[in-house]
Amino acid sequence: MDTVKLTIKNQPDLYLEADTICPDTFAGKKAEEIAGLHVYIGREQHRLGDFFEVSGNAGATPEETKIVVNGDLSRVKYIGMKMTGGEVVVNGNADMYVGAWMQGGKITVNGNVDAFAGTGMKGGEIVINGNAGNYLGAAYRGDWRGMQGGKITVTGNAGSDIGTFMNGGEIVIGGDVDVHVATHAEGGKIIIKGNAKSRLGGQMVEGEIYVLGDIDVMMPGFAYREDVDVDMDGIKGRFALYEGDLGERHRKRKGQTIYAKLYQRIEA
Amino acid sequence: MSELLIRNGFVFDPLQGIKGDRMDIGVKDGKIVEPGTLKNAKTIDAAGMTVMAGGVDIHSHVVGPKVNVGRLFRPEDKLFKSPYKSPTCSRMEMGSSVPSTFKTGYDYARMGYVFVNEAAMPPLHSPHVHEEIRDTPIIDNAAMPVFGNNWFTLEYLKNNEIENNAAYTAWLLRATRGFGIKVVNPGGSEAWGWGLNCVNIHDPVPYFDITPAEIVKGLIETNEFLGLPHSVHLHCNNLGNPGNYVDTIESLKLAEGYAPKNDFGREQVLHLTHLQFHSYGGDSWGNFESRAKDVMDYVNAHDNLTFDMGQVTLDETTTMTADGPFEHHLCSLNHLKWANVDVELETAAGVVPYIYSPKVKVCTIQWAVGLELALFSKDMMRTFITTDHPNAGPFTRYPQVITWLMSRAARDETMKTFKWLDKTIDATSIDSIDRELDLYEIAQMTRAGPAKALGISNTYGGLAPGMDADIAVYALNPENMPSDPTDIEKAFSRCAWLVKDGIVTVRDGEVIAEPAKRTVWVDVKVPENAQVQRDIYEHFLRHYSVKLDNYSLFDEHLHNPRVIEVDTTQ
């Protein structure tokens, strides 16, 4: 695997749209060609090299390409957007849409990310060693196709509206989350190791939410069923199982109605 | 002023019966003239190319409140699909199935179209419709107010007061600067206000106690009493459901015994729109099948009818209609988002996104039904290409529809992508049809026919001297048609030249000028009618949320009008 190193040297005055920072775009290119790729500030077109020091050549394919981005990237959007393979390591905070519509490969962010990371994600893995903003693994504005596959791990906290319209895949949050979890979801799994606030699973049709900490306010659309033992991926304990959202449509399998499931740990 | 000579093209003009003759078309001061009268003309070399009149779209939802709801509630319709960056236009072109006004105008022009009839104008919101017409460049627009669920109409027709209904119709056409009588799910959208529907033409409307059949017949009588350019334009009851071909044929039979009465060359009394959505057999989605043959046997045998296809193009699109109950029904099938609105005394509307997928059996059968209707038709002057934009697909897919109609190979290529090919073939006749339409028939279906049915064939849809100089030139040689059908699609997607009102508007598929667009409306003079005046006053006093003085369109909303005058007092 060949490594391309990008180090930010000039901060943009506004926000930089840099969906070109992606193994799929870099593959087969030399450092100087990569520096010549286009990035945008609003409607103005710039070169990637205007903002970044570029060193190292990319591999022949996305899978053989690793990108390491260093510095404060809190004004850089769309890192790793639509990537299908390879690896991206971000050493610093990144702005919105990290790994949006990602299909494969791995992104590691050693820092915080802003909103919409992993939007519409179909596959691959995102690891955020820090906090995530709102709309993590959610759908694009207006769209009903949220996260469909892959895995997002956040070691810190996440914002509101995570997993909106989620259809598949997994989101693991090490810390706490804000309001609205898995709204409209029709599949997938969200694990919250810390506390949650309220409105978990609103209009949720199918899928699973696990909360290891407290929930401030439970949705009235979720009904308590029973206490169950869970032993899954290192998560162990006795959980209260709730089913919902009772106000939504639900499909049936073998005569049984399938509800979305919300597990809250009552005993470690 | 400016003169133009379009030289040596293969000309197709069904209004004059010209079938691909190699000839010149002259243009002077925005009108078509005999080429011999030109003195100092600029020349466009159309040798080896197809020349037709500018396209006329009889049914498309391009302007107005429900289109805008579609734009607003589908931001994802713009994602990765726009903006198209034109090398010649500076306007942002946004959206795919619900494009921005600018993209709408430019894309129609790029396909060689010059006239688009907005298919449903809620009368109360006519100012919005006209403001968007103004903002849609190049193409001339008309807009049809909806009548089929209007309280005035229901009351007059209930009492069989055709003359009063005609006076009200004339008043509303003027108040909204409308073009003709549109009927959407007659009675059903009013019933929707009660949470109900009219599922067949004998199902009475709650409270008003009038049936859809009585509404349609009454409106045909009203239309012919007034002698409007266009006929009643009907979206039948029970759209989109298995087995609805029975209701459709019953609706068609309502036109029996009526003859057209007008001074505009129109020969039909009833236009059936998006007939594809109304030609289904079976009694469930499981045994859903095509009944295009049955419907077309009836249409072919009755020449006081015209129809447009409403062809499914197998895209992700946005459905929008004044058929409120249907949109609710659709939302309960696909579980996507739903917008719904009630328009006081007049109509309703709903909007739902929809994906016509080649992997879904019902969608591929719908695709076949639309094409079968056209391919079974014996009179292409009564058969028009539409996608009921954006309901069955975006209008930008007309070139694909044309290609399917012109090429069996293109149909086969598309059918190869079907997941349920065998079941689709079993449920339809499409695989047994070898018919391929020619360019003359395409010209009938896309300009001459619609212009004649709209009653505007003295101005649009043809190339006779005196008509508007709207001319589309396509890079297609009828003597040497491309072997690859995708080349036909390319040629119709981006015309080589479009001349509108004598101004070269498109060259090599890109817009290079924006000639002044017009709003076409119908002004009907009727005798004073004190009864109707009083009824209007009373309804506005008691029931409307706006005052009568604020209802009629203000002149500043009306953009560059072209008035078609009808005088019934003579």
Image (cartoon, coloured by chain):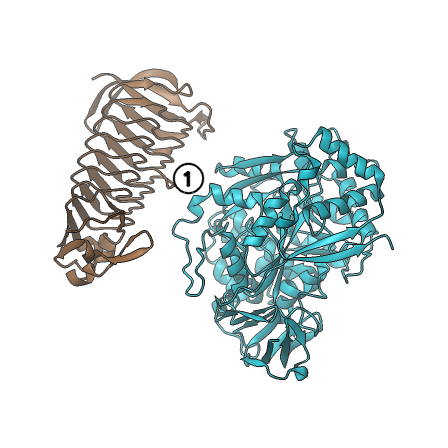
Can you see residue B62?
no
Tell me: A64 left or right of A77: left
Mark 1 crowd level (few <14, some 14–19, many ≥20, 10 Å Cα): many
Tell me: B362 left or right of B279: left
- Rendered-image quadrant of the N terminus of chain A: bottom left
- Rendered-image quadrant of the C terminus of chain A: top left
Residue found 25% across the figure and 37% down from its top: A152
**In the rendered structure, which amino acid carries the disc numbered 1?**
Trp
Which lettered chain is shown in brown?
A
Which lettered chain is shown in cyan?
B
Considering depth in this image, is B411 or B432 the residue closer to the camera? B411
Relative vertical location of residue B292 with respect to residue B476 in this rendering, above or below: above
Residue B358 x/y as whole percent: 48, 51
Image quarter of residue B194: top right
Residue B244 x/y as whole percent: 66, 43
Q: Which residue is mark 1?
A: A144
Residue A79 x/y as whole percent: 24, 47
Residue found 44% across the figure and 23% down from its top: A246
Residue B504 x/y as whole percent: 54, 71
Residue found 84% across the figure and 44% down from its top: B528
Image quarter of residue A244: top left
